Image: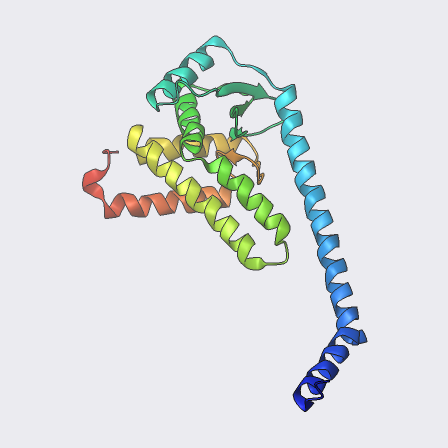
Amino acid sequence: RDRSPSRGLGDVYKRQFDTSPLIINVTRAVAIVWITGLAVAIMIYVFKRFRILSIRKESFACNKEMNRIFYEIKEQMGLGKCKITLRQSYRTTTAYVTGIHRPCVIVNADHFSEKEMRVVFAHELTHVVHNDIWFRYLLAVASILNFFNPVIWIFYRRFIKYAEYACDYSVCMSENGLHEYYETIFNLAVRNNNLYDMLSASLYENKNSLRERMEHLSLIHISEPTRRTPI
């Protein structure tokens, strides 16, 4: 038999590692913490998902004028063949889009002027064009599995921020300019509260984020004056 010292020493270290109570206890503790955190994260995800489905189920059809403007903008943005519906709900305070296979734009049960409707619909449909809901679901799953990793949450928050920047930029390019665009959104924010959810893309999350978006787009507007619509 092979009685080499190196092999014997390796077997000793292997047995010590395998039977070390400290390693076993630490591994068990980490596993318990991870499983507990994962269970809590899944429960939060399911609750948010159920809330969105509940709001969508209880929503109601919009009037003919809103549908006319919505489908007009939908056609203009090249989404005519996409199955995107428009609904209203008393349970939300702002507009947002949710759903992957059959996206649905849900707006609060409020009276909107035509200018407000055009801004709101263009913004939410831009989220569909950019596939933001797909990325939100992927990041939601990544956040659940890696709830302990702050990098994932920082990246998720940054994604939301820059996704809104991209939508703001696109809508400002196609609408009447920066001033009217943010004047409309700000007026909507003043009369309503915020709605934030990781599984949907809303018009605005809160007034602080809205102010930050206004400042960001203003800087782009100043740095590229020749490419902007006059305001």
Residue at the far top in the pictured view: 64
Is residue 38 or residue 219 the one in the foreground? 38
Instruction: Name which residue lies at 67% across and 26% down.
Output: 54
Residue 209 percent location from the top left of the image: 48, 45
Instruction: Name which residue lies at 56% across and 53% down.
Output: 153
Give left or right: position of 226 versus 105. Answer: left
Q: Looking at the rendering, in which quadrant would you find the C terminus?
A: top left
Residue 208 percent location from the top left of the image: 49, 46
Identify the image quadrant of residue 82.
Answer: top left
Residue 5 percent location from the top left of the image: 68, 90
Identify the image quadrant of residue 119.
Answer: top left
Give left or right: position of 231 versus 167. Answer: left
Is residue 91 or residue 163 the one in the foreground? 163
Is residue 183 or residue 143 the one in the foreground? 143
The answer to whether residue 16 of the structure is visible from this angle is yes
Identify the image quadrant of residue 20.
Answer: bottom right
Is residue 30 or residue 85 the one in the foreground? 30
Residue at the far left in the pictured view: 226
Residue 187 percent location from the top left of the image: 45, 31
Instruction: Name which residue lies at 64% across and 25% down.
Output: 55
